[in-house]
Amino acid sequence: MDNMEPDKTLLELAGVDTGYNNSSTGIKVLHSDIRCKVKKGEFIALLGPNGVGKSSLIKTITGMLPSLTGNVLIKGKDIRHMSNREIASEVAVVLTDKISDTYLTAKDVVLTGRYPYGSFLGKVTKVDIDKVIEGFEVVGAKSIMNRYFYSLSDGEKQKVLLARALVQDTPLIILDEPTAFIDSPGKIQIMSLLDQLVNNHNKSVIITTHDTDMALKNVSTLWLLGFNKEFYSGSVSSMVEQGIINRVFDRDGVSFNKNSLRFENI
């Protein structure tokens, strides 16, 4: 018998339509017939103009928003037949939602990432604590572990949320705007950490971002959303050479320069 390489597909979108089904306003389709796969060790940036539906796609991928048609498969299993705990053991999600509880320390926040593995009594084990400490060490934030979350800078908060995703111990991590509200040195730090997760910790990472220039320099794959319900997926080089980035983003007076990989006035 031939030795077959195991399937490395972590996530598959098979003919997915994203959007909303509202009882009063009816069905609103944002994007149609999305077909793509996420393989082990991929670093993907989901890009598109403001308001195009990036967050809606993330919510569809993670089961927070039902797909209108098609199937979202995690390791071949339809997400509609998975419990929240099962999904959380495969996909960690870092959203831009603010954590409002002022009484949580950074350690407490990271510890919530152990939810898929805890008992219904909420008992914290030594394994949980060891994972939390390891998470802080990986993101270089052990010194802030016992500080209150509300007192941290935006960059420090993002590191804590990234540590929480790490201790969830999933093969796939999805982050919505991980460099938002962070200064330039902080952005470089976060992108470097994400690159380490892919290359040194065998994770797959999907990010949404408005920082197109930085994304193009760091990721291996692009997902692009346009306002005409279109979806594109491919390597950074193929998207650049085929002019797809221009097709999605170009507008009056601004165009994407293939050579500098930047948007410029024309």
Image (cartoon, grey):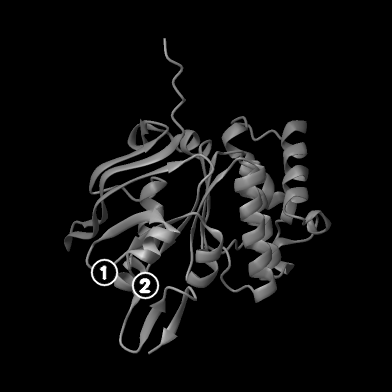
The spot of residue 98 in percent (x, y) is: 56, 64
Asked whether 7 or 20 is in front, the reply is: 7
On the question of residue 196 being in view, the answer is yes
Q: Quadrant of residue 249?
A: bottom left
Q: Position of residue 131 (x, y in %)?
A: 73, 39
SS under mark 2: loop
Please give the residue where the numbered disc 2 appears in the rendered image.
49
The residue under label 2 is which amino acid type? Answer: Pro
Q: Are marks 1 and 2 in contact (CB under 8 Å)?
A: yes
Residue 22 position (above or below residue 210):
above
Q: Quadrant of the C terminus?
A: bottom left
Q: Amino acid at mark 1?
A: Phe
Mark positioned earlier in the residue sequence (1 or 2): 2
Q: Residues within 10 Å of mark 1 (few under 14, many from 20)?
A: some
Residue visible at 63% across and 46% down in the picture? 199
Mark 2 crowdedness (10 Å alpha carbons): few <14, some 14-19, many ≥20: some
- Classify residue 49 by image quadrant: bottom left
